[in-house]
Image (cartoon, rainbow, N blue to C red):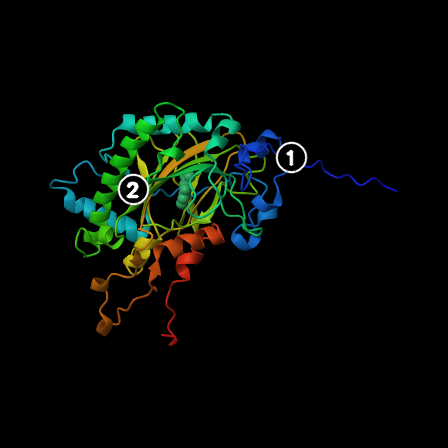
Amino acid sequence: MAAVVVPAPLQPFPIAVPGKPWTVEPVEVLVQHGVESIPQIYRRRKEHDAAIDVESTTTFPPPNPSTKRIPVIDLANWNEAFMKDVHAQLQSACEEWGFFRIINHGIPLSLMHDMMTVAKEFMALPVEEKAAYTGTPGVLSEGYGSRYIIKEDIIRDWRDFLYLRLQPLSFRNYDSWPTKPSSFRETLEEYSAQTKKLAQKLLAILSTTLGLNPSYLVDALVEPHQKMLINYYPACPQPELTDGFHKHSDFGALTLVLQEDGVEGLEVRHKGEWVRAEPIEGSFVVNVGDQTEVLSNGRYKSIEHRVVVNRDKSRISVPVFFDAAPEARVSPAKELLQEEAGNVAKYKQLKFDEYEMSFYDHGAKGKQIVESLIITNDRND
Ligand code: OGA
Ligand code: NI
C-alpha cells in the first residue's frame, strides 16, 4: 500500500508569554517555521475578488500594472492666496479618487523618519519580546498580534501589527506602549499630536468643500478618535496567493498613511483598476473612510484598497486613523438633504462602535459593510 505522506504539522508554535496566548499566531512565526505553501486560510478567494483568477495567477507582480497615479496635493500655501486651489484640488481628489497624496503638509520630515524608525525597531525585536504586548482578544483590544477576533471562515491577512489607541488622551493606555526602542513613547506622543492637527485641518477643508461649516465633520464624529497601526508585512513565499491586507475600505473618517521607503505594496481601486500608491519620501497617502462617505451622503466615497506582499522583502506602514467616538451616531448631514429636490438620505444611521464591531466580525471584504447601510428604494427609478 502506498504510504500516505502527511505534511509535518507546524505546531506547536511557541506560546507567546504565560497568560497571553496568541489569538492567531503572528505571520512572522509561520515564516520562521519556513512555510513554503501558505495555509488555505490566508489565500485570496475567487469570490473575494472575481477579477482575479487566483489559481491561474502565475506572474507576480502583474506584467502591466496601471500607470495611473493618485493625485498629489501640495499644501505649502494652504493658508494663503492658493487656498482656493487647495480646496478645489481636495474636492476633486475626494470625488474622483477617495485617495490622494499630500506634500508640504507641515509635519517635519525628521518626525516622519523617527516614527518609521521606531516602528521598524519595534518590529525587528524577537517575536518573544513583542509578544509581551499581545492584546487580549476582543474588539476593543490593542497591542501586538495578527488578528484579535477569529472566526473560522474569515480570510487572514499576511500581516502582523501593533495597534494603539492614541486620542483622546483619556483613551490612551501607556501600558500597551512598547518601551523598546527607548524613544518609542516620546516619538509617538509627538507624532500623535502633529497628525491630529493635520487631520483636523483636512477635515475642516473637506467640510467646507461639501458646503458645510468647517467644524462639521469633526463635530459629527463627536470627538475624533485617533488610532494607529504599525503594520508589518513579512516577505511571503507565495505572494500571488494572498494579500498583506485584503481589499477593504477604512471604517473611520480619514486615514493618513506613512510608508516605508523603497518597498511598494499599497494599491487603490480606481475605475476598476488597481493603482499603486508607492512610497514617496515626505508624503502621506490620505484616504476617505466609510464615516465620511455616510456623512457626505455618498459624495465622498471611501475607496477599496489592498496591500500586496513581496517574495523577498518585508514592508512596514504606519497608518493613523481618525474615527468617530464609540457613541457617535453617524448619518448623512441634514444640510445636504433637500427632500423636496429628491435629495434624500442614502445611508442609514449607525452607531460607531457597532459599525467598528461589524468590521472586525466580517474581516476585510471590500465595501460590503458600508454598502449594507445604503437605503434601497422600492421604486426602481
Ligand atoms: C490599513 C491599510 C495600508 C498599508 O491599515 O487600513 O490599508 O499600506 N494599510 O499598510
Ligand atoms: Ni486601509
* Circle 1: residue type: Pro
The C terminus: image quadrant: bottom left
Front label number (2 vs 1): 2
* Circle 2: residue type: Ser
Residue 232 location (% of width, % of height) = 46, 34
Q: Foreground residue, 102 or 318?
A: 318
Does residue 362 lie above or below 36 as drawn?
below
Does residue 78 lie above or below 95 as drawn?
above
Residue located 26% across and 49% down the image: 223
Q: Is residue 88 visible?
A: no
Residue at numbered disc 2: 170
CA gap between label 2 and label 1 equals 39 Å
Q: Foreground residue, 63 or 53?
A: 53
Does residue 297 lie above or below 321 as drawn?
below
Residue 212 location (% of width, % of height) = 19, 56
Residue at numbered disc 1: 12
The N terminus: image quadrant: top right
